[in-house]
């Protein structure tokens, strides 16, 4: 009865996941509890999935990705994507698919998605697109690209090792490209032509909910000498890429009328409106700086180690009714004002000459004790703090170098992937690229519970005999239709099992049965093995694949979204695999 119980639980879990009526982490934990109470799993087996390397690796990648985003290093990728697309959504998607797919052929899928996640979300905001429009293609491109080489996915490596144990030739580095490349090309065509109509648009990126990181501030930015923005047209410049609206242009102390052909010059002061997170990044981008910072440096003031915070002026503040200039704010407070927000008003006066009001939000920089002193006197309330930006870009570049070394070390087998990425995450914390609190906040614990629990469910399918029962049933039903029909059945079964097991686990469960079946049918076992391996690598029906997990939350997707878009992609890929595998690895 155990096989039927496990299969029934899997069906119930998938229905609950799809309905979204109960949180996926609660469903997962309830599933594990049921398996333990029924005796299918021991308590140790039920929770063993949370001690697997993939949990540590995913958690570490969440932290590293957040640190690279906070230090501004990933902005470069966003700029490159924007330059390539030229504002054209179709061109952007094409470049994203082929670029990510090509990189994913030589790197871990999850790693590639983590690298591009931040830049793609930022680019969607700048182009007023829903991030959900781009993130699902990003995940799918990384999965499809992994089918092209031996090291493109851990599933390929695992199956190649199993081939060796079965006295079959191991998989060559580019052997899978014979089928992987056509699968990629057809998959990309499907996403560009049909999938784009099925991918949900949850919201416009420019319409995020309120919160500290999405408040719009007005600030003054200086175009430094030798800045790459010199010569760029005002309305088609990197300010648009960075998510800013240009309000005014000052040159030589006078306002310059802005026309479609006005270009920036060195020393220009640009009054802009933008999100606080982007204003802070201005301080990390070469060739740009906030006017207040430039003034302070020219005055010999050392702001190294200064904190940046958002504060609200209270009615009791001595600044209310006065300007920053006539109140001598910088001298009296020891703080510098970087930007100002006031409702939805567009402030076009010089920041220092704006008459302040109760409720105004200021982005200020200075020693933490000064901020706390003003807060204790009830003159202002700190509503958000940001890490010191001094040297952040250099630390981010060092972290990126460590990330590349971790990828290389794990790819060459010098370090286990979990250890390699954990070391980089610890480096991010040690170098203050990210605070410990922010690191915990950026880990998606709900999804880690999901993947750990479903790994344990794979053990339940093996222990109960449910996986073998399905495989034996399939062979008996299809043998009469010929070897290729049996191969097709194993490919479909592998895809089905990957919805409850990890890709590698599903492949390794089906592989021995498939090889035995091939021997019985007197066909080349390697043909069946290649079919199983490739089928395990196209699991996109549900968000259980780690690449899909990474975009699940940021894209505001629902479980059913992956089934709707992924079903056509899986169908196209399966047809190609079932057709081409016997061509390149003949059955007889």
Image: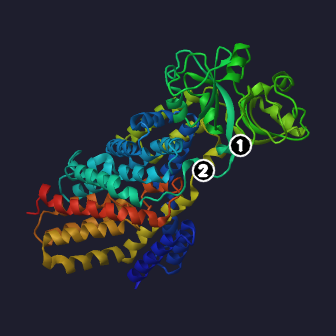
* Image quarter hosting the N terminus: bottom left
Q: Residue furthest bottom?
A: 1
Residue 379 appears left or right of 345: right
* Image quarter hosting the C terminus: bottom left
Please name the residue shown 65% across and 44% down the image: 213
Q: Is residue 50 above or below residue 119?
A: below
Q: Earlier in the sequence, mark 1 or mark 2?
A: 2
Q: Is residue 275 above or below residue 572?
A: above
- Residue 203 seen from this side: yes
Identify the secondary structure beneath mark 2. helix
Q: How is the image coloured?
A: rainbow
Kindly identify which numbered label has been placed on residue 344.
Answer: 1
Q: Nearer the viewer, residue 2 or 218?
A: 218
Kindly identify which numbered label has been placed on residue 305.
Answer: none
Q: Position of residue 459 (x, y in %)?
A: 42, 69
Q: Nearer the viewer, residue 521 or 9?
A: 9
> Callout 2: few (<14), some (14-19), or many (20+) C-alpha neighbours within 10 Å?
few
State the residue position of label 2. Answer: 207
> Callout 1: few (<14), some (14-19), or many (20+) C-alpha neighbours within 10 Å?
few
The image quarter containing residue 326 is top right
Please name the residue shown 74% across and 43% down the image: 343
Q: Position of residue 131 (x, y in %)?
A: 50, 50
Residue 544 appears left or right of 486: right
């Amino acid at each position: 009865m155990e096989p039927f119980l496990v299969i029934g639980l899997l069906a119930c879990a998938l229905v609950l996941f799809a309905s979204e009526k109960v949180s996926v982490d609660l469903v997962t934990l309830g599933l594990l509890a049921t398996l333990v109470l029924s005796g299918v799993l021991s308590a140790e087996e039920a929770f063993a999935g949370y001690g697997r390397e993939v949990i540590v690796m995913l958690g570490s990648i969440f932290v590293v990705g957040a640190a690279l985003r906070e230090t501004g290093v990933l902005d470069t990728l966003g700029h490159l994507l924007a330059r390539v697309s030229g504002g054209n959504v179709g061109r952007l998607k094409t470049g994203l698919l082929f670029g990510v797919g090509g990189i994913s052929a030589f790197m871990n899928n999850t790693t590639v998605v983590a690298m591009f996640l931040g830049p793609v979300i930022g680019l969607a905001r700048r182009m007023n697109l829903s991030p959900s429009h781009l993130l699902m293609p990003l995940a799918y491109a990384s999965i499809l690209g992994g089918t092209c080489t031996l090291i493109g996915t851990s599933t390929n490596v695992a199956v190649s090792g199993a081939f060796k144990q079965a006295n079959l030739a191991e998989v060559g580095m580019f052997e899978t490209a014979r089928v992987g490349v056509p699968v990629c090309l057809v998959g990309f065509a499907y996403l560009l032509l049909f999938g784009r109509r099925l991918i949900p648009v949850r919201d416009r990126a420019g319409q995020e909910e309120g919160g500290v990181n999405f408040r719009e501030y007005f600030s003054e930015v200086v175009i430094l000498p030798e800045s790459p923005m010199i010569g760029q047209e005002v309305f088609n410049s990197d300010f648009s890429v960075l998510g800013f609206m240009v309000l005014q242009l000052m040159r030589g102390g006078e306002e310059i009328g802005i026309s479609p052909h006005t270009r920036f010059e060195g020393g220009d002061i640009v009054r802009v409106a933008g999100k606080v997170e982007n204003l802070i990044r201005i301080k990390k981008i070469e060739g740009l700086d906030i006017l207040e910072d430039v003034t302070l440096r020219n005055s010999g003031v050392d702001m190294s180690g200064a904190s940046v915070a958002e504060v609200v002026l209270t009615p009791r503040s001595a600044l209310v009714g006065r300007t920053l200039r006539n109140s001598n704010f910088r001298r009296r407070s020891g703080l510098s004002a970087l930007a100002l927000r006031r409702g939805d008003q567009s402030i076009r006066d010089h920041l220092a000459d704006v008459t302040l009001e109760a409720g105004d939000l200021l982005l200020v920089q200075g020693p933490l004790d000064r901020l706390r002193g003003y807060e204790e006197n009830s003159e202002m309330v700190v509503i958000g703090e940001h890490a010191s930006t001094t040297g952040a870009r250099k630390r981010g570049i060092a972290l990126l170098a460590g990330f590349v070394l971790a990828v290389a070390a794990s790819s060459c087998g010098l370090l286990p992937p979990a250890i390699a990425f954990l070391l980089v995450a610890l480096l991010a914390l040690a170098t203050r690229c990210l605070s410990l609190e922010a690191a915990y906040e950026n880990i998606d614990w709900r999804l880690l519970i999901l993947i750990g629990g479903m790994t344990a469910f794979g053990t339940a399918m093996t222990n109960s005999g449910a996986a073998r029962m399905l495989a034996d049933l399939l062979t008996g039903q299809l043998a009469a239709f010929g070897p290729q029909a049996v191969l097709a059945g194993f490919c479909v079964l592998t895809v089905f099992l990957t919805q409850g097991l990890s890709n590698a686990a599903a492949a390794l469960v089906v592989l021995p049965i498939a090889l035995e079946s091939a021997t019985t049918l007197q066909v080349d076992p390697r043909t069946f093995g290649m079919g199983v391996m490739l089928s395990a690598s196209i699991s996109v029906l549900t968000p259980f694949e780690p690449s899909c997990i990474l975009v699940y939350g940021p894209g505001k997707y629902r479980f059913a979204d992956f089934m709707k878009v992924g079903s056509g992609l899986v169908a196209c890929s399966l047809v190609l695999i079932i057709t081409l595998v016997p061509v390149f690895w003949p059955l007889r």
